[in-house]
Amino acid sequence: MKIDFVSDISCPWCIIGLRGLEQALSRTGDLIDADITFQPFELNPNMGKDGQNIGEHIAEKYGSTPEQSAANRAMIRERAADLGFTMQMSDTSRIYNTFDAHRLLHWAHLEGKQAALKNALFSAYFTDQQAMSEHGVLTAAAVSVGLEPTRAAAILASDEFADDVRTAERLWQSRGISAVPAVVINDRYLISGGQPSEAFESALRDIAAEA
C-alpha cells in the first residue's frame, strides 16, 4: 500500500495523525505492507528564521484569544499523550520556518531514513522545544538517526534539494491539499486530519479489501 503523508514539522495534528496511522498499521498485521513517504507542506512558508511566539501567531492567523489558544494546546497535549507522545507546548513556545527541515527529510528519504528523521524532528520540536530553523538542531536530529553529520551540514549550508521540495509542495497543492495532515493512499484515497487510530484502521482495512 502506497501512503503519502503530507505534513509539516510544526503541525501538532501531524504527529497525532502519524501516531494514529502507525498504531492502525500495527493492528492490521500482515494484511497491509505500507510504504510511507513523507511529503512536504509548509504551514508558514514566510516565517522568519527567529520564528514567532505561538500565542501571537495563532491570534494573528486565526483570531484566537489567549484563553482559547491555551485550551486548544491543552487538548492537543492530551491527545498526543494518549498516543504515547509528549508535547511541551506552552505560552512561550515558538513557531519556526521549516523549509530546511523538509530539505533534510528529502535527503533522508534517499538514504532510507526518512521515517526515523521525521519522528526525531517531531520530538525535537514538540517535546524538546528546539528551533526547527537552526541548522545545528537539524543536524543533531539527522545524526541521531544514523545520517552522516558532514553531509547533513553541507546540505543545510547550501540550497540542495530546495527545488525538489518546492516542486513536491506545488504538486500536492495542485492536487487540492490545503491543510495537513493529509494521508493519500494509493494516489486515490484521502484521509484528512489527525484521526484516531480506529478511524485509520477502518479506512485501511476497507481500502485493502477493495484492492
Image (cartoon, rainbow, N blue to C red):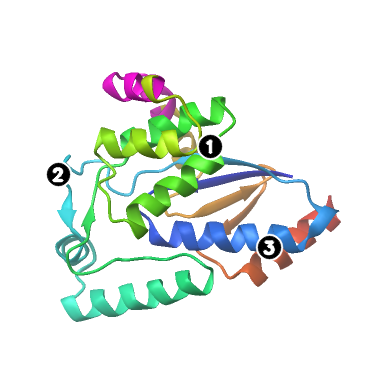
Is residue 193 visible in the rendered structure shown here?
no
Element type at mark 3: helix
Contact? badges 3 and 2 (CB < 8 Å): no
Q: Which x, y percent locates residue 179?
A: 42, 54
Task: Please name the amino acid that badge 3 sits on.
Answer: Ala
Does 153 lie within the magenta span?
yes
Does 135 lie within the magenta span?
no
Location of residue 60 by image quarter: bottom left
Label 3 – label 2 distance at C-alpha: 37 Å
Q: Which residue is mark 3?
A: 24
Location of residue 76 by image quarter: bottom left
Left or right of 151, for residue 195:
right
The residue closer to the viewer here, 44 or 173, is 44
Left or right of 18, for residue 46:
left
Q: Which x, y percent locates residue 42?
A: 35, 44
Task: Please name the amino acid that badge 2 sits on.
Answer: Asp
Contact? badges 1 and 3 (CB < 8 Å): no
Element type at mark 2: loop
Q: Which residue is mark 1?
A: 114
Q: Which residue is mark 2?
A: 50
Q: Which x, y percent locates residue 1?
A: 74, 45
Task: Please name the amino acid that badge 1 sits on.
Answer: Gln
Q: Residues within 10 Å of mark 1 (few under 14, many from 20)?
A: many
The residue closer to the viewer here, 96 or 58, is 96
| Sequence-wise first label, 2 or 1 | 2
Q: Measuring 56% from the left and 26% from the top, which residue is drawn there? A: 111
Instruction: Specify the segment rendered in magenta.
Output: 151-166
Q: Measuring 42% from the left and 34% from the top, which residue is drawn there? A: 142
